[in-house]
Image (spheres, rainbow, N blue to C red):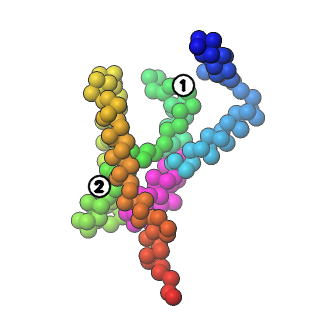
Amino acid sequence: MEDDMEQVNDKLELVYGLEDKPSPMESAYAALQHLLAIIVGIITPTLIIGGVLGLGERIPYLISMSLIVSGVATFIQAKRIGPVGSGLLSVQGTSFAFLGAILTAGFIVKGQGGGPDEILATIFGICFVGAFIEIILSRFLHLLKKIITPIVTGTVVMLIGLSLVKVGITDMAGGKWLLDNKPQF
């Protein structure tokens, strides 16, 4: 059994260590791989929020801002600026975890007669305050391990999925666009 583990560990050696510098061609190839892997994850939450809340012409702007902020945050994470960053290529991007809360806030503003500008202002304000709450809580993460058990995290992940069911069903097979542009037979 131990021999098997040693063989597996021998096969799992890292190609590059933390401070290694791959060639420019390998770096470009790795960058292209990362770009293709992350672009959908960064753009999709923006498309969902914009589409569901009826933000229409503002969606390209929101996608651009998502990509720019993701790039800057990833650079800071990879470069280790002071106490911030891991020194590893850890892509920072949007998260599906917040979609339920953001959509709920948007629907509340929309229900009170707010337009796209008010919806975006509310969402940006919530995200701004939430970012500082996350920064503060990150300093106490080691204490939360006793509270945040696998059962808690599993429940949260399930609730994230359940909060996206309505969006998925609405957008399935053409979604809102198909309802607005019903084919005439």
> Is residue 49 shown above or below 57?
above
Residue 107 in the figure: left or right of residue 3: left
> Is residue 80 shown above or below 94?
above
Magenta-drawn segment: 43-68
For the residues labelled 2 and 1, the Cα–Cα distance comes to 35 Å
Question: At which x and y percent is residue 166?
Answer: 37, 60
Label ID, residue 105 = 2
Question: At which x and y percent is residue 42?
Answer: 51, 48
Mark 1 lies on a secondary structure that is loop
Residue at 47% x, 81% y is 182
Residue at 46% x, 23% y is 82
> Is residue 64 shown above or below 86?
below
Give whichever of 123, 94 is nearer the camera: 94
Q: Earlier in the sequence, mark 2 or mark 1?
A: 1
Is most of the magenta stretch helix, strand or loop?
A: helix
Residue 19 seen in the current view? no
The image quadrant that residue 18 belongs to is top right
Residue at 67% x, 21% y is 11
Label ID, residue 135 = none
Residue 40 seen in the current view? yes
Report the quarter where the N terminus lies.
top right
Q: Amino acid at mark 1?
A: Gly
For label 2, the crowd category at 10 Å Cα-Cα, with few meaning under 14, some 14 to 19 and many 20 or more, is: some
For label 1, the crowd category at 10 Å Cα-Cα, with few meaning under 14, some 14 to 19 and many 20 or more, is: some
The image quadrant that residue 14 belongs to is top right
Residue at 38% x, 56% y is 165
Is residue 105 magenta-colored? no
Q: Residue furthest top?
A: 2
Label ID, residue 87 = 1
Give whichever of 9, 136 is nearer the camera: 9
Question: At which x and y percent is residue 138?
Answer: 35, 28
Is residue 52 magenta-colored? yes
